[in-house]
Amino acid sequence: MNDLTTGSIPRHIIRMAIPMAAGMFFQTLYYLIDLWFVAKLGDAAVAGVTSAGTVQFIIMALTQVLGVGTMVLISHAAGRKDRADASLVFNQSLGLSVVMFLVTLAGGYALMGMYVRTVGADVETAQQGATYLRWFLPALALQFGFISMGSALRGAGMAKPGMIVQIVTVLCNAVLAPVLIAGWGTGRPLGVAGAGLASTISVALGVVMLMIYFRRTETFVALDAGQLRPRLDVWGRLFRIGVPAGAEFGLLFLNTAIVYWIIRGFGPAAQAGYGIGSRVMQSMFLPAMAIAFSAAPVAGQNIGAGRKDRAEETFLSAVKMGSVLMMLLTLVCHWQPSALIGLFSGEAEVVATGTEFLRTISWNFLASGITFTCSGMFQALGNTVPSMITGVTRLLVFAVPGVWLSRQPGFTLPRLWMLSVAATTLIAVVSVLLLRRAFRQVAPRPVTPPLADVPAGG
């Protein structure tokens, strides 16, 4: 465990953020590598993979339930120096990840056909999306175990092990993608099915590596078979924090799915342009997201230690760092947006759609960074209901007006992107106001004595 309750807060954030950003960058390479090879298969393949890939937001919502709850409870336990509770939370989280793995596989295979038919621009796009999901779903299901273990390490103040594992898995995916998608060396290209299979194999490798790390190295939170038996009281603690955070990501998925539904009438090239543009945007967000997500365990340990003042200082430091990065990224998107999109497609209509998207949407980068940081602080406080409120706000001020706007004569996609900029700015203001209120409700408290420690088992 790394103690984040003393020392320089900016230094703690940077020390956590650097490996986290690296890990997130390599994680994003999963999608960019696949996207580069899939783009060679045509617009329908790109549109199918990117639109079907939005189902990942559903899994992100469910993994947030598990991951946020695990990180927060373990960071609070670390602040109290309470190893026994931290290990109990970790093992209960790991047990839950197995249950959610099985539910994801069963539900995903049952519903994927209906989903791709709903969001696909045409029959071929829907078929490509279904083929991709058929092989990608196991990778999504395995994310629960990956997130459970990674969140436990974040709560304990350690980001480097997760970074190393992510780098290895991305290297594995980078090797497998051309072999399985394009048939390099085998002469048997699998197309979009190969993209999904490459990700599944790579994520499985990452889960195995983390299991080995916890078995051989980790001591503050350790695998203990005796603590895997369901404890409803611990599940309740995880769900009380995790469910609102998961709902926030679920609402984000709903917004994204609505965007695909709105633009489906513009054809596969428009969906492909939006899909590439949104992936590029997500990859550009990584440094600011790493800062926000690193601030969460720093503030969380200080909340657990009764240091409200240091938690507030963590928020201010993270906002300053993230804002500088987001302003720089905005300039990049106004400088050469077409070059960024052109890396993945040479189709004129795809590049034009993606370029217009990036140039317009980049005006909300600063507001997005502030919202990310507020979300991390809500997690640190163990009060994630405000995050869910911001998700509902996004639905009301963007998705609902967007559907109405799309039905008006002369509707064009730039109007939708401008609506997103205005909505994101409003959401940032709401997030800051909710966070100020949440901090006022937290009073400095004395540190309670830790529970009796128990030896690691298993």
Image (cartoon, grey):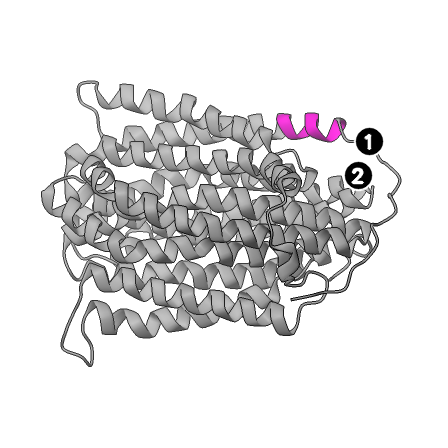
Magenta stretch bounds? 434-440
Seen in the image, is 7 located left or right of residue 368?
right
Q: Alpha carbon of mark 1 to alpha carbon of mark 2: how far?
A: 7 Å
Please tell me whether mark 1 sits on a helix, a strand or a loop. loop
**Compared to 401, does 130 lie above or below?**
below
Seen in the image, is 40 located left or right of residue 289?
left
Please tell me whether mark 2 sits on a helix, a strand or a loop. helix
Q: Amino acid at mark 2?
A: Lys
**Compared to 7, does 392 lie above or below?**
above
Note whether residue 393 is visible: yes
**Compared to 446, does 15 lie above or below?**
below
Location of the C terminus (image quadrant)? bottom right
The picture quadrant where one finds residue 437 is top right
Q: Nearer the viewer, residue 305 or 98?
A: 98
Q: Which residue position is annotated with label 2?
A: 308
Seen in the image, is 277 located left or right of residue 323?
left
Specify few, some or many for label 1: CA neighbours under 10 Å numbering under 14, 14-19, or 20 or more.
few
Q: Amino acid at mark 1?
A: Ala
Location of the N terminus (image quadrant)? bottom right
Q: Residue furthest bottom?
A: 185
Q: Position of residue 231 (x, y in %)?
A: 63, 44
Magenta portion: prevailing SS class? helix
Residue 307 forms part of the magenta stretch = no
Q: Position of residue 29 (x, y in %)?
A: 39, 62
